Image (cartoon, rainbow, N blue to C red):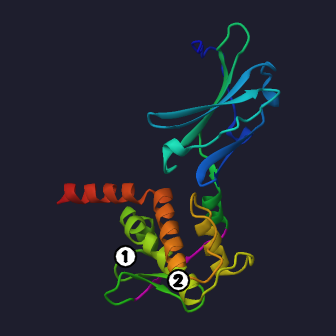
Amino acid sequence: MPRLNFTGRRRIAQDHVKISVSAADGQNCFSARLNLETYGFPETAAVIVEAYRQLELSRFEFGTVTRPIPPPNCRLGEFGALEGVKFRVKVVSNDAPKGRLLGVADRIVASDQAIDRIRRIPLINVKGHDLGREVWKIDFADEPILLINYRLADKHALARSGVFQSLVLPEVLRSILTRILLVDQYRYFEDENDWAARWLRFASSFPGVGGVPEDEDAELDAEWIDSAVSAFCQWRGTDRLFKEFWGDSEQGA
């Protein structure tokens, strides 16, 4: 590949780049929508999208400025969990001097379908409550509410902490899915206003999980719940969060 010349490059605004991450055939993949028409780049200039995290890098050729054709394979399987993955868009000259970097947009955070769903619709409300000696519990009186003992910790600070997200949130997900499938025997996605349907859509959106088993079979439902919790842990990077918490705890001992 010709050496890139960074002289005279233009900064591409991040609002002209839209990258979305989703699951296809059990693997993470991405799509890119680019608006490069206002920058005056040569029509034949190549468009390259890079996914990166620290020393990991994958490069994808997206055709030219006037014909931004995505490659047939935009999978991100080599990254595993996508925690910390960012994207970079480059416009590179195909004319003399070939390889000159004409424009770049960097440090782009992808829009994730599962994350977007959480941001649009709070899956679970968090409330402070006097729980005696318990730190947390789930109240199923109506739709699930995560109760945190206000006598012991600030509810928001605790819910955001690495130890809570690594040790508690997976069990919250498991408890709620168990209630939906094994106790209430509910398995429908269609109702946008139903809390159980929202949780089922959320859990099934992770790579490799798939749809809820059609038949009411406790063993199959339990296996599906395990798969959903495992995928959730991969998405959240719960092992990394726990290692960070445990390392800080050992250093402070």
Above-or-below relation of 79 to 172: above
Instruction: Please report whichever mark, 1 or 2, sits nearer to the chain's N-terminal start.
Output: 1
Above-or-below relation of 18 to 101: below
Q: Residue furthest left?
A: 253
Q: Residues within 10 Å of mark 2 (few under 14, many from 20)?
A: some
Q: In what quadrant of the picture does the N terminus appear?
A: top right
| Residue 128 counted in the magenta span | yes
Dot 2 amino acid type: Ala
Q: Residue furthest top?
A: 96
How far separated are the C-alphas under marks 1 and 2?
37 Å
Q: In what quadrant of the picture does the C terminus appear?
A: bottom left
Q: Which residue appears at 64% of the width and 68% of the height?
A: 211
Dot 1 amino acid type: Ala
Q: Give the x, y percent position of residue 74.
A: 64, 40
Q: Which residue is mark 2?
A: 218
Q: Secondary structure beneath disc 1?
A: loop
Q: Residues within 10 Å of mark 1 (few under 14, many from 20)?
A: few
Would you say 197 lies left or right of 165 here?
right
Q: Which mark is residue 153?
A: 1
Q: Which quadrant would residue 160 be assigned to in this image? A: bottom left
Question: Are circles 1 and 2 on residues that touch, CB within 8 Å?
Answer: no
Q: Which residues are magenta?
A: 121-130
